[in-house]
Image: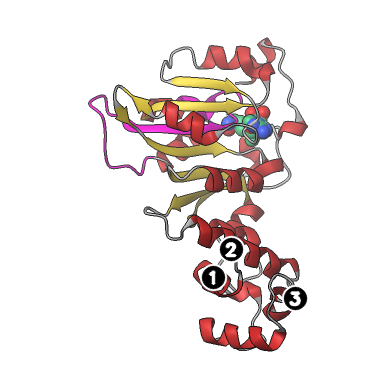
Amino acid sequence: MSEILNRHGFTFQKKYGQNFLRDPKVPKRIADACTEYGERNGDGKIPALVLEIGPGAGILTKELAERFEKVLAVEIDEKLKGVLAETLAEYPNVKVIFGDIMKINLPELLESEREKDGKRLHVSVCANLPYYITTPILMKLAETYHGFDYVTVMVQKEVALRLTAAPKSADYGSITASLNLYGSVKKLFSVPAGCFVPKPKVDSAVVRISMYKPAKFTDEQIEKAKKVIKAAFSVRRKTLINALSQVCDYNKEELKEIIFETLGKDANVRGEELDETQFVKLAERIIKE
Ligand code: SAM
């Protein structure tokens, strides 16, 4: 891989979180972890469209193209155009779009790309995410497009711990509860820092979000719950009552009663003790619109 990057005069850009996979075993393992679907086409491929964010030099893209009917890769760095054209030349089922994933209209793009020969493909995400915007990307994926089955991504190990943390644990936070409104998150395996070039300071891990099918909560429930989650974790060491009194019209005495009625918990309960369903229940009771 370094040979092709050198030949195209490519230099890594820190601002884009460019730590490319160097060991071909890792992208194979990640792509294999995405093959949850039972269905296969006549050619052995999975009838799904996979969105890859940040194909880099295409090392994971190739593995996805071997396994899935269609791959759509969105890359911000146009300097990778020549490299990707060369590495993906043999894969007509890959389409690369140059742009910023945070600015792309995902529903519009994915709905048009998933139509193939009169059928609708399944849609999943598989990516080695740029670390500087991991959580904004995950929230954008969950919030803007409801058609994903699985979102399988490599993230920094610390982020993986946060994403998969259980209520009451030190790593459980606003991103954990918020993502759990859309799907359940599981850590699949760790990847040491030495598998990347340039070598990052920390190890990574691959996690999979299995999106709830059908959705567990309505859009309205989710919007309300997010307000409560945000308030609950903005004042982490305070009690939930203190946090909630800032986002609703109820006074502390009323909130004490509501928390007991809806959750069966006493006045000292903290936000980090609640799971996503409890946040939804509470939000429905205290957030008017
Ligand atoms: N998939 C490659 C691999 O595993 O070797 C590269 C992964 S590297 C961690 C992250 C990639 O995301 C880089 O290619 C980077 O240029 C790209 N990237 C960074 N920010 C992006 C954005 N906002 N939209 C799309 N791609 C982005």
Residue 42 spot, x, y in % from top left: 22, 26
The magenta-colored residue range is 35-62
Q: Quadrant of residue 130?
A: top right
First in sequence: mark 1 or mark 3? 3
- Report which residue position mark 3 lands on: 237
Observer-nearest residue: 11 or 216?
216
Q: Secondary structure at mark 1?
A: helix
In space, the residues marked 2 and 3 are separated at their CA atoms by: 22 Å
Q: Which residue type does callout 2 highlight?
A: Lys
Residue 201 spot, x, y in % from top left: 73, 44
Does residue 258 sit above or below 151 in this rendering? below
Does residue 35 sit above or below 167 in this rendering? above
Question: Crowding at label 3, few (<14), some or many (≥20) Cα neighbours within 10 Å?
Answer: few
Ligand 1 found in image quarter? top right
Circles 2, 3 touching at the beta carbon (< 8 Å): no
| Residue 284 image label | 1
- Report which residue position mark 2 lands on: 224
Q: Which residue type does callout 3 highlight?
A: Arg
Instruction: Quadrant for the N terminus, please.
Output: top right
Q: Quadrant of residue 5?
A: top right
Circles 1, 2 touching at the beta carbon (< 8 Å): yes
